[in-house]
Amino acid sequence: RMLRLGLSLDVASALRYPRDVVPASDFVSVDPKEDELRLGRSRTLRAGADATLIAYGSLAETALKAADALSKEHGIEVE
């Protein structure tokens, strides 16, 4: 999907391949209605009204764990 998106652009683009082991989490299943990748779009993996964590790649799973910990330990709801 990423290669297809890059090839469809009229400008230079680059693909990022992780150097480390990527967690086994399947973030695509979070919203199955969004099959197409589009520039300038993001995906919210967790709802929250107090703060926002922004992460991509292998750090997305770590950000979700941090958001869960903030919710459980401090009552801070992070998206």
Image: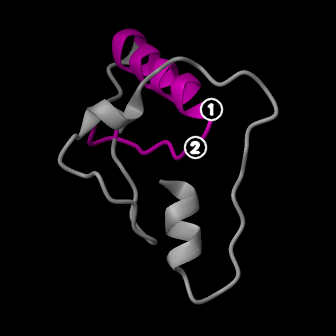
Any mark on residue 56, and which?
Answer: 2
User: Amino acid under label 2?
Assistant: Tyr
Name which residue lies at 52% across and 47% down.
54
Q: Which residue is mark 1?
A: 59
CA gap between label 1 and label 2 equals 6 Å
Q: Which residues are the magenta region?
A: 45-73
Residue displayed at 25% across by 52% down? 34
Can I make out residue 28 in this image?
yes
Colour mapping used in the image: one colour
Splitting the image into 4 quarters, where does residue 79 fall? top left
Quick check: 15 left or right of 35?
right
Question: Which residue in the rendered view is the most extreme toward the left?
Answer: 33
As helix, strand or loop, the secondary structure at mark 2 comes to loop
Identify the residue shown where x is 36% and y is 49%.
43
Q: Residue at left 46%, top 25%?
A: 64
Residue 76: quarter of image: top left
Decide which of 19, 49 is in the foreground and name it: 19
